[in-house]
Image (cartoon, rainbow, N blue to C red):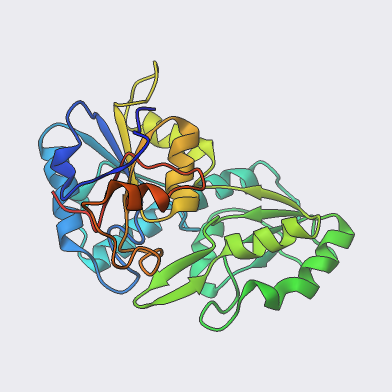
Amino acid sequence: MTSPTSPQFINGLSEITAGVDIVLSDVWGVLHDGLVAFQDASAALKTFRDRGGKVVLITNAPRPADSVQRQLRKFGVADETYDAIVSSGDLTRNYIAERPGQKVFAIGPGRDTPIYRGLDIPFSDLETADYIVCTGPFDDDTETAEDYRDMMMKARDRGLTFICANPDIVVERGDRLITCAGAIAELYASIGGDVIFFGKPHRPIYERAIALANGPADGWGGRVLAIGDSIRTDVSGANAAGIDCIFLTRGIHAEEFAGLNPDDPAAIAELFANGAKPRAVMTDLRW
């Protein structure tokens, strides 16, 4: 990893892609905010591809990649923006498929049911399940992790493994922050429950993305660049994988970065004093 001690503030992707073969881009917060697409971001990734690079979208969406693609098309994000998509939903599906016949207690909103499509799963209640799969709260418009504390204590007492299909704690939806599965998973872990996370910041999603891009097998640093708006998942995940990362300030951390002076390297460094270190910082993705 080649990230400097103090991240540099850049105005465009073009300033940092010399020698980069593959871009791994987050989706929610980078390409859209759950309501509208960011056209400059799509154009930047397409320009990188037009110049010979590969773009793989890596997302903690608890849905299969084809469902993510359909959503992107609805937002107006063209297929030409990227080469492939890897989702935490796909990794979760692999886990489920390897356990035929085991009963699942599913937590999540109805829109996430595509994660189970084509899988022969016996669903059950909490009292008889073999394990839990969580894609988010049942109602993420109103619920928080604390609404699940009693349920999680019962699950812990039964010794159930909790499969987190979206490690994000929150995600932006327009101008609101919405609770994600990661918040419930962290609650379960904090009371002694067994949790398995699929998606960023965990290494398997990076390995899968680079494999799809036919990327280098002899080290990733400098040749692979990640982009995201979450310090916890995008920056920390890239750091752990040895990949440089661009951090976007306009996403879920926008309030913390309000008023940032891009000409003050010390101020930028201070915001990352707790360990996660991007190579560069920019407001939003553009070429």
Furthest toward the bottom, the residue is: 142
Where's residue 269, x and y in %?
37, 47
Position above or below: 74 against 228: below
Position above or below: 202 against 116: above
Q: Residue at x 45, y 66 (%)?
A: 171
Furthest toward the right, the residue is: 157
Nearer the observer, 272 or 235: 272
Instruction: Report if residue 221 is visible in the image.
Output: yes
Instruction: Report if residue 78 is visible in the image.
Output: no
Q: Is residue 184 left or right of residue 245?
A: right
Q: Is residue 21 left or right of residue 44?
A: right
Nearer the observer, 79 or 25: 25
Where's residue 191, x and y in %?
80, 60
Where's residue 40, x and y in %?
15, 58
> Total of numbered circles in the picture?
0
Q: Quadrant of the N terminus?
A: top left
Nearer the observer, 53 or 274: 274
Position above or below: 86 against 221: below
Q: Residue at x 49, y 62 (%)?
A: 114
Where's residue 52, x and y in %?
14, 31
Q: Is residue 141 left or right of residue 227?
A: right
Q: Residue at x 23, y 29 (%)?
A: 20
Position above or below: 10 against 212: below
